[in-house]
Image (cartoon, rainbow, N blue to C red):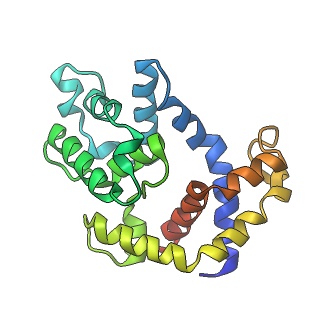
Amino acid sequence: MARIELEYCSLHYLNQWPRRERSLFESFRHLDRDTRLEAIAEAASFFKVARNLPEKYDTDEGKQRYQPILKIMDALEPSNFIPTKFVTAVQRVRDKVSQKYGGREVLSVTSKLLWLKFRSPIIIYDKRARTALNVEPGNYEEYCSRWLERFETHQQVIKNACDQLPPLRKYCSDPDLATESYIRKLASDTWFRHRVFDIHLWHAGA
């Protein structure tokens, strides 16, 4: 893993978080039900996974778009996703979402929505990252195992890249929000470094 790649990925995510994912993360926690539904719709569009959730399983049946997913997501608590058991928990939610959407494969969309709701310890399942990790489709357990192993191997390089971000605030999409102290705190969080690694894998698996 070249250092320049991680520096690029860290700066990329420093812009992506405040521009897109931060508002989605906050909306997933909003008290207003319609706001949470809109967040699911925006997330499905942003992550390009809406096609995995055909409208014939919600709006065509007289339900609001993504209503079945919201009902599943609203019933979940952080305690359902402890680090030692999150893989099984994600698979269980995947099965529930799949049942509501015609038995389709929805692991990618499920993991991405769960990450927006809880962040760590959820690991996002992505086709390009799966290719980079050389894992068979749909094997979330093996995917997470290899993901964590690879992350651990390169953890110091990722940390070094993130530690260099605070002086780069003028290159951030929202420099008013991204003060050096804000960036320093953000870049030190495990979930932020996980997403930097996600971006690296996404490019590696292109």
The answer to whether residue 29 of the structure is visible from this angle is yes
Q: Where is residue 100 in the image (x, y as percent from the top left)?
A: 17, 37
Q: Residue 30 or 109: which is nearer the viewer? A: 30
The residue drawn where x is 33% and y is 57% is 85
Q: Where is residue 56 in the image (x, y as percent from the top left)?
A: 18, 32
Q: In which quarter of the image is the N terminus?
A: bottom right
The answer to whether residue 7 of the structure is visible from this angle is no
The residue drawn where x is 53% and y is 38% is 25
Q: Residue 35 or 160: which is nearer the viewer? A: 160
Occupied quadrant, residue 189: bottom right
The residue drawn where x is 31% and y is 72% is 142
Q: Where is residue 138 in the image (x, y as percent from the top left)?
A: 25, 64
Number of disc labels? 0
Q: In this view, does 105 lie above or below 203?
A: above
Q: Is residue 31 left or right of residue 80?
A: right
Q: Is residue 164 left or right of residue 131?
A: right
